[in-house]
Amino acid sequence: MMLSSNEANQPRWHGQPGFFEIWFLVVFDPARRRAWWLRYTTFAPPIGPPRATVWAAAFDATTQHAVAGKLIVPIDRFDAGARDGFGVRIDTATLGHGMCRGEVDAGGHRLAWNLTFTPAATVAHRGPRWLDRVPSPTHVAHVNSEILFDGRTAVDEEQTSLRGAPGLQKHIWGTRRVEELFWIYCPRFLEAPDAAFEASSVRVRAGRPPRLTSLWLRANGHEEYGWWGLPGILRNRIVVTGAGRLRAEGTLGGTRIIAEAACDPRSLVGYVYRDPLGKDLFVAQSDVATCTVEVATRRHRFAPWQPRTRLTGPLAAVEFHQPIPLPGVRYVPWDATSV
């Protein structure tokens, strides 16, 4: 059944302990080579009071500088009521069907945003649909993919107007966080502005199988590829190839894809996440990475690969989610609001 974006965003937490829920957005500003990462969350440990948090980070590829912080509030300052569909509020920050706004103090800096977007008609599928039907500690819905944002953002007194800024919004929830996750997302390429690419690789327990890796590419307005069928989702790979660098590779019949994404390590923002059972995980993200995607084809399994498409993305997101911190990355502690 195809869900609307409004339905897919509906809260799954109804007060039960041992549960987390996340709504996050990534907004790119290609003209200025800047980006924003915005996150609205609830966290309910098995024992103890739940809480709500607004996370925000602003990235600048020109200076390789990032500003990040978060607002932590008691759960009674969280509200999930909306008269016209989906809507959540944490303190004064809100996320609704086609809008988001908020403000966060980030270690002496002020991050603020007031944005609108046209919601997608239905959720996107970037992996096998059977994953939505099996018992899993973590679930994800690609609620609003390749959407366009309008509005304003601010870092301290510097305000930026956005019009037609590409990005996405996802909804994640569950009882356990995955221990290992690598992610690449590029919403626009120089050779084809309507092309887009996304790849993710997860393991519930780091170092233990199975590792599930899905790759998706829209090469132009109508040609789409999805590398996630069995056994491909088990054979595909995303690997760390250096500081701030990821490589994704997959084969689907006679088509092969190789993607390389890289960011300046100075642009990485680090956050400490906590699993509902108490284990800390380390997440580093940059939304001002670059991405190249190459597609090759061959006539049969013994024929050589022939290049078909090469795409260059000047602005992309990368994420490194592991049980140990990345060297050189400063992380915002779980109970702190800034580094």
Image (spheres, rainbow, N blue to C red):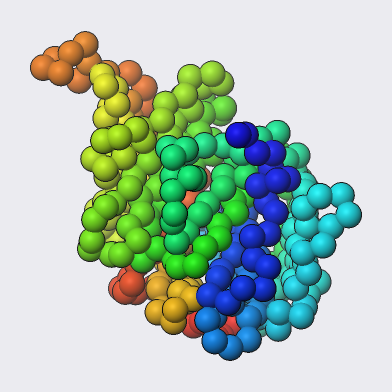
Between residues 41 and 307, which one lies in front from this camera angle?
A: 41
* Residue 135, placed above or below residue 14: above
Residue 94 position (above or below residue 190): below
The residue drawn where x is 73% and y is 45% is: 6
> Residue furthest toward the bottom?
48
Front-lying residue, 276 or 265: 276
Q: Residue furthest right?
A: 83
Q: Position of residue 271 (x, y in %)?
A: 48, 73
Q: Quadrant of residue 31?
A: top right
Residue at the spot x=55%, y=57% of the render? 172
Q: Quadrant of the N terminus?
A: top right
The quadrant in which residue 79 appears is: bottom right
* Percent of width and height locating residue 308: 32, 18
Horizontal and vertical percent position of residue 212 = 33, 48
Q: Is residue 286 visible?
A: no
Image vertical order of residue 46 relative to residue 111, above or below = below
Front in this rendered view, residue 253 or 71: 253
* Residue drawn where x is 26% and y is 52% of the image: 210
Task: Say which residue appears at 26% left-offset and 22% top-offset.
Answer: 253
User: From the viewer's perspective, is residue 243 above or below residue 327?
Assistant: above
Residue 300 shows up from this direction? yes
